[in-house]
Amino acid sequence: MDPKKFAVYLIVAAGVTYLVRMLPLVLVKKQIQNRFVVSFLHYMPIAVLSAMTIPACFYATGHLLSAAVGFAVAFVLAWKEKPLLVVAIGIVAGVLLTELLFFR
Amino acid sequence: MRSSDFHRGLANGVPICLGYLSVSFAFGISTFNSGLSVVQTTLISMFCVTSAGQLAAVPIMLAGGTLLEMALAQLVINLRYTLMSVSISQKLDDGVTLPHRLMLSYVVTDETFAMTTAQRGKISRQYFYGLILLPWLGWTLGTFLGAVAGNLLPPLLTASLGIAIYGMFIAIVVPQAKHERPAALCALIAVGLSCLFRYVPLLSRVPEGFVIILCATAASAILAVHAPVNPEGGN
């Protein structure tokens, strides 16, 4: 990708990401009281991550079947509240085994 | 005392660092393969330090999206850090002065935030620096290794590793949804909407960055109205 175009994109992406982290830490001294804002921010992470995961993750491997198996493994491990690393290894292992079994 | 704070922070950062290594390795592979150079791929992780935001940023770059789309996507996807930073600001001791706040806020992530909430009492800057150092290094190094060595690995393995980042998202979403019914509902609404944008003919033309914004704001707003939480946290 063209270095100049890339640099502009990176500055915008990194700049916005930094500002949303930095401004509250520097400016906010009191707890937010507005109930809608607090609630909205409370639900935001799960909404963002869910929307980014489904359906995109089913197309991340090249085969719907292997991605679905990986997803199922990760879901079960996450349901059992295993650590992040274990879930990440689980989803990869599920995909890898399915690919080896059915697509080789 | 202070140097022991630093060491305690380092120790707390080790598991985060290991998780980041694997996930960022996958990001490195997929981003390099999508057409960015090794240096570009690594710079994204070094300066953004945000999994979901980066994953959304790359397609916008490659599709030649507008800077407004990029800024809005990053704003909405990363808006959660605002709440985390607000929360952290309440816990910092007097030694965390303005210059330190400017530095430390750079690596406020889901996982480092989670670790600070687990601390009893105030947090010193020494602890915070210790906490974020290894995760930041791991995130950057993992991305670099993925971009460099990803293509030395068998294609089967790299295709499989690409899904690892979703494993991290699932690991964060599912336990919260399991314990908190409104959060589960919120996740279902967001998923339903994102499927609509994927499969309904006209909607599928909406740029990916905006899809995430629309799904997330709609789902969060619906739940914020119908199942508001207390300002102190919890339902």
Image: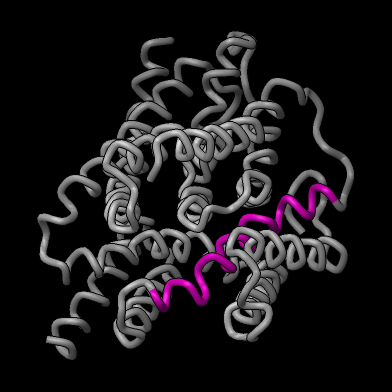
Q: Is residue B191 above or below residue B96?
A: below
As displayed, is residue B201 above or below residue B197?
A: below
Q: How is the image coloured?
A: one colour
Q: Which quadrant does the N terminus of chain B fall into?
A: top left
Instruction: Report the front residue among B163 and A9.
Output: A9
Which percent across, then down, holds residue B117?
57, 38
Q: Which residues are magenta?
A: A37-59
The residue lying at 77 percent from left, 26 percent from top is A28
A53 drawn magenta:
yes
- Which residue lies at the image location 11% right of the left edge and 59% below the top edge? B153
Asked if residue A3 lies in the magenta stretch, the reply is: no
Quadrant for the C terminus of chain B in the image: bottom right
Please provide percent x and percent y for residue B79. Answer: 67, 45
Q: Position of residue B110 (x, y in %)?
A: 52, 45
Q: Residue furthest bottom?
A: A102
In the image, B121 versus B88, the foreground residue is B88
Question: How many marks are shown on the rendered structure?
Answer: 0
Magenta part, dominant SS: helix
Give above or below for B117 relative to A97: above
Decide if residue A80 is on the left or right side of residue A53: left
Viewer-closest of A88 and B198: B198
Residue at 81 percent across and 68 percent down: it is: B222
The image shows residue B184 at horizontal and vertical percentages of 64, 72
